[in-house]
Amino acid sequence: MIRLTALLTLGVMATINCLHADEIAEVSIDLLHPTQAFIAHDQVNYKLGRYRIDRQKLFDDLCETWGQGDDAIINDNSRSTDRSSFRCTLSDQTGFRLQDMKTAVRGPQGRLYLTDGHHTFSTFADFEETGPGLIVPVVITHDRSDLDEAAFWQWLQDNDLTWLYDADGQMIATADIPARLGRDSLADDAYRAALYFLRERVWNRPQPAMPFAEFYWAQHIRSHPHLQQPDLQSAQSWLRWLERITGHMLALPADTVIGPNGEGPDAMGRMSAEEVRALDSLVCDHGEPGRLALALAARGIPATCHALGQHAEHSIVLSAPDNDVTGLSWH
């Protein structure tokens, strides 16, 4: 397996044109092309909030991105943009855990199209310390640079490597896919966010892995009028909506079609009622702010353990005037 640095600037375009399938390319995030138009902004918001209060998590995720496990060794001088300033405990070898790495396809004119990692790399792109210029690795699973634009996108569709739907579940054209990653480019799908927050609480990703599993569940949920997205301006409104979705998912008959090939809810990862975890841990997790609380803080929405009638040593305070979480702090 060849490992190449492919920065895709004018000066190194020849390098990217030398890539072949099953290689690892190192490329700046701003030169990776999305294959979907929507992401869950609150999933990205959660990670941004987490990084700002838990620096270790940022470096752990960087190690995982490089296929070197999810445990980093850092110090006060470690910088996320300097790989020599921190270590990964599992291995120093890029791709040691290839299954953890994000994937891309080489398309027309040597462009790299991301097929897994839209949320992870959008988070890095939107995080002020890393930014869109951060160099990240991707596994090149296919080289289809032989195809023209129309044939390439048709090939992506035929191989379930693109999601051509909007946040209302309507088909979109390939021309509607943004050119770059990040929340400023990729629009928000709250239903996709709901499935993220419910993952490992109500359902797990199907095994073997299925592309766009969250989106298939989201398509099903949005098709039911009683589960329509409410005004999500508080932790309580989010939790009430998630509770309705949970009840619906658990009550679905086993023969309900969810997946692209007729897969039912159990094949799509639904847990049994006995396995379901309490949803209020999304706001207050053992006295600490949970995933939903951190995501809401990024939008300037307070969410604390006290709001759920629980005691916490810490709560979230948002002081940044632009509703960013740079002012996120513990109190």
Image (cartoon, rainbow, N blue to C red):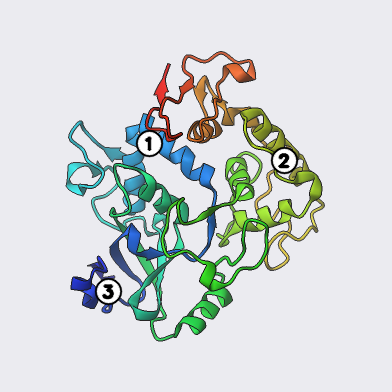
How many other residues sit within 10 Å of disc 2, few (<14), some (14-19) or many (≥20)?
Answer: many
Q: Residue at x 39, y 80 (%)?
A: 108
Q: Quadrant of the N terminus?
A: bottom left
Question: Label 1 sits on what residue type?
Answer: Tyr
The residue tagged 3 is 16
Q: Earlier in the sequence, mark 3 or mark 1?
A: 3
Q: Earlier in the sequence, mark 3 or mark 2?
A: 3
Q: Earlier in the sequence, mark 2 or mark 1?
A: 1
The residue tagged 2 is 246
- How far apart marks 3 and 1 lie (CA) works out to 31 Å
Q: Quadrant of residue 54?
A: top left
Q: Quadrant of the C terminus?
A: top left
- How far apart marks 3 and 2 lie (CA) works out to 45 Å
Q: Is residue 268 left or right of residue 155?
A: right
Q: Residue at x 52, y 15 (%)?
A: 312
In the rendered view, would you say 11 is above or below 148?
A: above
Question: Label 2 sits on what residue type?
Answer: Thr
Q: Position of residue 78 (x, y in %)?
A: 21, 38
Question: Label 3 sits on what residue type?
Answer: Ile
Q: Nearer the viewer, residue 28 or 259?
A: 28
How many other residues sit within 10 Å of disc 3, few (<14), some (14-19) or many (≥20)?
Answer: many
Instruction: Look at the numbered disc 2 and give the secondary structure of its residue.
Output: helix
The residue tagged 1 is 51
How many other residues sit within 10 Å of disc 1, few (<14), some (14-19) or many (≥20)?
Answer: some
Q: Position of residue 196 (x, y in %)?
A: 57, 45
